[in-house]
Image (tube, grey):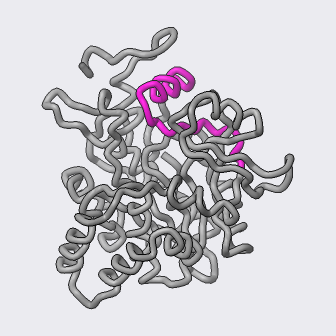
Amino acid sequence: MPDLKPGPLSNHPSGHAWALVLAAGEGSRLQSLTTMESGLAVPKQFCSFGGGASLLHDALARATSIVSPEHTCTVVAEHHERWWRSLSETVAPENVFVQPRNRGTAIGILLPLLRILHRDAEASLIVLPSDHYVRNEDVLASRLRDAAAEVARRRDRLVLLGFAPDDADPELGYIVPAGGRGPTVRAVSEFIEKPDVASARKLIQCGGLWNSFIFATDGQALLRAFEARCPDIVSRMRGIITTDADASSQQQQLQMLYDQLPSLDFSRDILQESLGRLGVAAVPACGWSDLGTPRRVAETLAQYGSMPRTRSGHLASSQGFLDLAARILPVPGGFRLQESAR
């Protein structure tokens, strides 16, 4: 868990720096690890990796190393309430945005984006998934600040963080920076979401980086990208959020809207259609993993051995969390589940 020291964005004179942690996913690819004997599958963001706080708590701490706790938000799924209801101990209730149901990563970002912009029309955002492991948090935080500084200079730009690939993984997105080695943030020549293995290898040969789904953006610029792709959804959702109705009534209206919404993927449906606005900052090696599959969990565990324990801080939870690292055993050429996890 990162040290909880506010970064320079926390003291930005404009006071418009926000962080959004995405925590509404199902974690279906990891359910062989996260399903308990009762048959209940725990979404991976509510599990720990090494016996400390949950991955969500780690991501929230990661966010508060960049922006103030008052501007740190998360989006969660309504049907996950049993796991997130205790977040009020660490995140202001008004900063926990509840989705009625999962409609893909694009809708999962649009709802909290509109809620943040309703409160602060000049907001800039750092967006972070809630299911990553990072060995060296300081390296990642430094690149996040670089990305945020680039967005402050160029308000129309969305800056993605990219990592040098270990292999041609078809489960990840790829970003090909334009030109040779240059400044910290470079333009993007190609952005491909989950290519096949052969295509992924070609992208890596061209200097392609893994898309971490961590990015910095100006709120209004991101909203314009949504409006270009799904203007009707933006209009209907904004109409609900900006109404004078109480929170319960708004949630009921959102439920009816979500019942009618298609599922939209942020990378495929928004980013791939916004290539001219994208920048990428390559992150030096910092022990990052998206923990997206049992294989990724096993590889991370094999590479780093014992996990660092949770550091003290106001985001450390007293709750016990299902430990992914304790449920898997790396073996030559792969992994197997621990007997206690079967």
Residue 77 seen: yes
Q: Position of residue 50 (x, y in %)?
A: 41, 32
For the image, the number of numbered tags is 0
* Foreground of the two, 84 or 224: 224
Quarter occupied by residue 22: bottom left
In the visual, does 99 lie left or right of 146?
left
Q: Position of residue 185 (x, y in %)?
A: 75, 57
Residue extent of the magenta highlight: 282-306
- Eyeballing the image, is 271 above or below 193? below
Residue 145 seen: no
Measuring 37% from the left and 15% from the top, which residue is drawn there? 336
Can residue 284 be found in the magenta stretch?
Answer: yes
- Eyeballing the image, is 244 above or below 261? below
Measuring 66% from the left and 60% from the top, which residue is drawn there? 275
Q: Position of residue 233 (x, y in %)?
A: 38, 73
- Name the residue at the bottom extreme: 244
Measuring 52% from the left and 53% from the top, which residue is drawn there? 268
Can residue 116 be found in the magenta stretch?
Answer: no
- Name the residue at the top extreme: 332
- Eyeballing the image, is 227 above or below 27? below
In the visual, does 263 lie left or right of 148?
left
Quarter occupied by residue 41: top left
* Foreground of the two, 232 or 88: 232
Measuring 72% from the left and 67% from the top, which residue is drawn there? 150
Q: Position of residue 204 (x, y in %)?
A: 71, 35
Specify the quadrant that holds the C terminus.
top left
In the visual, does 77 lie left or right of 16?
left
In the visual, does 123 lie left or right of 138?
left
- Eyeballing the image, is 226 above or below 311? below
